[in-house]
Image (cartoon, rainbow, N blue to C red):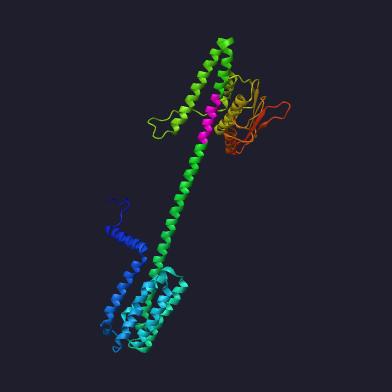
């Protein structure tokens, strides 16, 4: 192995211990009562083995009656069953039994089972409670040292206190590790939720953007085609040449719409075998071509431009283009016969200002499809594009008696491009 290679795989023995620990914890979560019964049965069995006669090897008083030995054995081991639900009550019973054990001189080894309860207290209860538990467990040690002073105090009490302290520290360490792991799991869960929410928001925003682009592309071109077809229908009887020109314009507009739609769908297609055909987004220099197409569809448009679009960023240029496109499309669809449109574009120090007005009837306007009181995709798309650049958009009917419709757009200058 090279020195710069990172060791990512744990030792096989560590993996085995981790798997065993996970299985034990999983069993404990599924069957807590079964696990408590197994643990209690183990310690009761070990205590009974000591009570059968082994306790006399270390007891300062070997004349303790057998029934008392049995009762103390049960008092020191059986309460383990309830150690997790009522740890302090269990410790109280075991300490009381331990006082009798120390006073009688039996010194049953089952008294060491108190350390298991101390571990549970360190795992689940506040540190203040842990301090009281330590004082309670010290009482039998003091009683035994006073009642049977065979060795010095430090030999009878200090080793046990060190054992209690180590068990308490072990419980605190395991508790801290569990809290840390739970915090990591919760953090990971929150990150997954945030990731899913961000993905949903991004998908919703992308769907909105795609819907807006498709509406602008298809809606405008279909409106132009409709105008050309209507004009060609009237011209067919009187001027076949004009009808042929209208059909040529319909074909050109249709191919342009199909090309833009194909490019958009190629970008959306998953796993496309070839890179999608790309083309520049419309800019302010394309406004002339846009207006010529609208004029060809039968809508007279007068254009006035003040200033130069050279300093306008591409994103703002696209927004201006789409707003003009949507406004003229609405005039084509709802302006009625004899409608005329005016497009005024001003490039100033404070930004871009566009005003599109027409002399149409002005009824059922504001959406492209529905009355102005119920905004649809057209006006909504214009407002969304304007909001991206902190601009303002006003759309509504002109006052009578002139009538008509007005769309006013202002996009402030990009602060990042200001010298």
Q: How many marks?
A: 0
Q: Foreground: 383 or 240?
A: 240
Residue drawn at (56%, 21%), measured in percent from left and top? 226
Q: Position of residue 281 (x, y in %)?
A: 52, 29
Q: Is residue 57 visible?
A: yes
Identify whether 215 is placed above or below 201.
above
- Is residue 124 inside the magenta stretch? no
Look at the image and give the residue range highlighted in magenta.
209-222
Q: Position of residue 313 (x, y in %)?
A: 56, 33
Identify whether 48 is placed above or below 309.
below
99 on left or right of 243: left
Residue drawn at (39%, 69%), measured in percent from left and top? 171
Residue drawn at (43%, 75%), measured in percent from left and top? 88
- Is residue 210 inside the magenta stretch? yes
Residue drawn at (45%, 31%), measured in percent from left and top? 265
Q: Quadrant of residue 239?
A: top right
Q: Foreground: 136 or 316?
A: 136
Identify whether 414 is placed above or below 185.
above
Q: Position of residue 264 (x, y in %)?
A: 47, 30
In the displayed orientation, state which residue is furthest to the right.
401
Identify whether 8 is placed above or below 345.
below
Magenta span: predominant SS is helix
Q: Is residue 159 visible?
A: no
Q: Position of residue 366 (x, y in %)?
A: 62, 32
Q: Foreground: 140 or 78?
A: 78
27 on left or right of 303: left
């Amino acid at each position: 192995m090279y020195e710069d290679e990172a060791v990512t795989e744990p030792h096989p023995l560590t993996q085995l211990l981790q798997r065993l620990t996970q299985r034990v914890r999983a069993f404990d979560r599924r069957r807590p009562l079964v696990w408590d019964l197994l643990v209690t049965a183990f310690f009761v069995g070990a205590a009974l083995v000591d009570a059968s006669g082994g306790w006399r090897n270390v007891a300062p008083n070997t004349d303790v009656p057998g029934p008392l030995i049995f009762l103390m054995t049960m008092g020191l081991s059986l309460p383990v069953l309830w150690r997790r639900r009522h740890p302090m009550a269990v410790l109280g019973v075991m300490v009381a039994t331990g006082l009798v054990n120390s006073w009688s001189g039996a010194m049953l080894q089952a008294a060491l089972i108190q350390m298991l309860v101390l571990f549970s207290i360190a795992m689940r209860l506040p540190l203040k409670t842990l301090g009281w538990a330590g004082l309670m467990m010290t009482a039998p040690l003091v009683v035994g040292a006073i009642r049977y002073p065979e060795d010095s105090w430090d030999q009878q009490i200090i080793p046990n206190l060190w054992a209690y302290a180590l068990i308490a520290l072990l419980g605190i360490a395991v508790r801290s590790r569990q809290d840390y792991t739970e915090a990591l799991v919760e953090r990971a869960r929150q990150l997954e939720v945030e990731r899913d929410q961000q993905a949903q928001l991004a998908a919703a925003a992308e769907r909105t953007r795609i819907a807006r682009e498709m509406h602008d592309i298809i809606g405008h071109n279909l409106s132009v085609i409709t105008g050309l077809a209507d004009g060609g229908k009237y011209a067919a009887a009187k001027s076949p040449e004009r009808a042929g020109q209208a059909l040529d314009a319909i074909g050109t507009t249709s191919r342009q719409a199909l090309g833009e739609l194909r490019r958009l769908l190629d970008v959306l297609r998953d796993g496309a075998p070839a890179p999608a055909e790309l083309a520049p987004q419309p800019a302010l220099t394309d406004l002339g071509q846009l207006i010529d197409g609208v004029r060809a569809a039968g809508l007279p448009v007068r254009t006035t431009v003040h200033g130069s679009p050279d300093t306008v960023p591409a994103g703002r240029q696209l927004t201006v283009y789409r707003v003009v496109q949507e406004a003229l499309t609405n005039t084509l669809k709802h302006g009625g016969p004899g409608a005329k449109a005016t497009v005024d574009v001003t490039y100033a120090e404070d930004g871009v200002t566009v005003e599109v007005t027409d002399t149409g009837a002005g009824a059922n306007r504001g959406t492209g499809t529905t009355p102005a009181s119920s905004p649809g995709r057209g006006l909504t798309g214009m407002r969304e594009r304007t909001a991206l650049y902190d601009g303002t958009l006003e759309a509504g009917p002109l006052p009578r008696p002139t009538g008509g419709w007005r769309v006013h757009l202002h996009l402030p200058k990009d602060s990042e491009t200001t010298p």
